[in-house]
Image: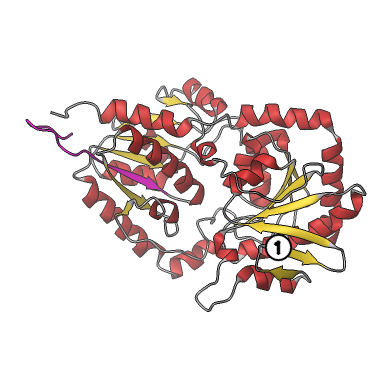
């Protein structure tokens, strides 16, 4: 810890390993900045470029790179080979070295993720807290960590274990992890409404399309969801509307000046309009694609048709029903979707067990119709969302506990 006769700037490091982990981390960082404005904060995103941190102008303290798997090697172990060929071990070694170097001067570390970030936190020699966002007792009704993870969580340097849901904290406490607690899911704090006019009809049900955020997979997923919109529309003679919450990378020109969303639309028979609309003349469909009002879409929709990770968790937390169709991956495969069903419970219906076909699309459209007609089930989804995810405030609570433990002593 910093000490001396004068006020010193305190310094902390956030380590995370995945898109969802980064999203949760930055919500904690935002709250921590409000509570401790003079605090120096560094970040080491282990997976991807760490754009969530960069968007907040948080210093990235080591090398970052987007590897072929996108961090989803558990869906397809062969993807790990691609990552290794692309320099995974060299990258990881350089990242750990950067963590150890930066961590020498830190007061504490916040690790968000699994064994990699926990090991990095431990190797700094500094105290740390852990948010095990990728682990839940809902998967198997128990918790069983790899031996190294278990040791790192039980280390004297680990002062607190935050869980993603109450049930996991309860199970961990029963298994002897007395440092485990649930204070909320920070990703829910990210759902701030912008007030953007979505130009929707208040009288028609709204289905939100969530294709994910990683290209090129998000583009492939969106094609399937556009097919689903076509299949669903005839089932609602009084009308239905769709709005796709897409990544900015789909809507904005790439390095060649090409707009990926335009390519996606043309490949599946839709017409692209620069104002953010897609139309399908044959089926007389008009669909908005928006990249800067995700929370607005999620709050206003009646149902989510999704092929995403954290975004689906946020939708469940808001009490929305989910209809999923598996894709080709690397992230959103049936393996991923099935795990999400165990994690998130009755709010989710997954249609099919293999990459979606025309038959799968038809079945999913029918599931959307049945779901929107089932008021009892819709009410159950609202209850389930609070149980599985909880409300907002997790980022602020974690930041406050972290600051109380590490940052409000030895300032003078």
Task: Report the predominant secondary structure element of the magenta stretch.
Answer: loop
Name above or below for residue 317 compared with residue 230: above
Q: Residue furthest left?
A: 5
Q: Is residue 156 visible?
A: yes
Q: Report the number of numbered marks.
A: 1
| Location of residue 347 (image quadrant) | top right
Looking at the image, which residue is at 66% across and 56% down?
Answer: 211
Looking at the image, which residue is at 29% across and 34% down?
Answer: 36
| Location of residue 27 (image quadrant) | top left
Looking at the image, which residue is at 68% across and 45% down?
Answer: 338
Residue 59 falls left or right of residue 256 = left
Name above or below for residue 17 compared with residue 9: below
In-front residue for pair 176/52:
52
Looking at the image, which residue is at 29% across and 55% down?
Answer: 61
Name above or below for residue 383 compared with residue 66: above
- Give the magenta range: 1-16
Q: Position of residue 243 (x, y in %)?
A: 71, 53
In-front residue for pair 110/320:
320
Residue 27 falls left or right of residue 372 = left
- Image quarter hosting the C terminus: top left
Q: Position of residue 192 (x, y in %)?
A: 54, 40
- Image quarter hosting the N terminus: top left
Residue carrying label 1: 277
Mark 1 burial class by Cα count in 10 Å: few <14, some 14-19, many 20+: some
Residue 189 falls left or right of residue 330 = left
Q: Position of residue 411 (x, y in %)?
A: 17, 29
Q: Position of residue 149 (x, y in %)?
A: 41, 39
In-front residue for pair 372/95:
372
Q: Is residue 357 visible?
A: no
In-front residue for pair 67/26:
26
Q: Any magenta on residue 9? A: yes
Q: Any magenta on residue 212? A: no
């Amino acid at each position: 810890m910093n000490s001396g006769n004068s006020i010193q700037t305190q310094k902390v490091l956030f380590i995370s390993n995945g898109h969802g982990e980064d999203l949760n981390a930055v919500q904690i960082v935002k709250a921590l900045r409000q509570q401790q404005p003079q605090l120096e904060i560094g970040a080491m995103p282990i997976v991807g470029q760490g754009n969530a941190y960069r968007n907040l102008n948080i210093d990235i303290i080591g090398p970052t790179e987007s590897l072929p798997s996108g961090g989803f090697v558990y869906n397809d172990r062969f993807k790990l080979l691609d990552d290794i060929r692309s320099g995974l071990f060299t990258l990881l070694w350089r990242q750990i070295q950067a963590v150890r170097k930066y961590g020498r001067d830190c007061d504490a570390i916040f690790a968000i993720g699994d064994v990699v970030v926990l090991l990095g936190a431990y190797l700094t020699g500094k105290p740390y807290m852990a948010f095990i966002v990728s682990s839940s007792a809902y998967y198997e009704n128990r918790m069983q960590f790899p031996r190294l993870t278990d040791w790192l969580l039980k280390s004297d340097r680990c002062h607190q274990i935050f869980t993603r849901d109450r049930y996991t904290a309860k199970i961990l406490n029963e298994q002897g992890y007395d440092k485990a607690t649930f204070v909320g899911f920070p990703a829910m704090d990210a759902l701030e409404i912008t007030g953007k006019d979505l130009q929707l009809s208040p009288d028609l049900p709204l289905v939100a399309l969530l294709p994910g955020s990683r290209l090129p997979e998000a583009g492939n997923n969106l094609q399937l969801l556009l097919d689903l919109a076509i299949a669903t529309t005839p089932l609602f003679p009084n009308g239905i509307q769709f709005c796709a919450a897409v990544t900015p990378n789909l809507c904005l020109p790439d390095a060649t000046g090409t707009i990926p969303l335009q390519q996606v639309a043309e490949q599946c028979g839709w017409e692209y309009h620069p104002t953010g609309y897609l139309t399908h003349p044959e089926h007389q469909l008009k669909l908005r694609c928006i990249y800067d009002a995700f929370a607005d879409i999620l709050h206003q929709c009646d149902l989510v048709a999704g092929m995403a990770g954290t975004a689906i968790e946020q939708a469940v937390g808001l009490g929305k029903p989910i209809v999923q169709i598996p894709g080709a991956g690397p992230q959103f495969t049936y393996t991923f979707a099935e795990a999400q069903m165990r994690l998130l419970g009755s709010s989710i219906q997954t249609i099919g067990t293999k990459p979606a076909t025309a038959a799968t699309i038809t079945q999913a459209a029918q599931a959307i119709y049945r779901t929107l007609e089932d008021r009892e089930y819709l009410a159950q989804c609202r209850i389930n969302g609070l149980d599985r995810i909880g409300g907002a405030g997790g980022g602020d609570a974690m930041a406050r506990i972290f600051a109380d433990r590490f940052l409000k002593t030895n300032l003078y």
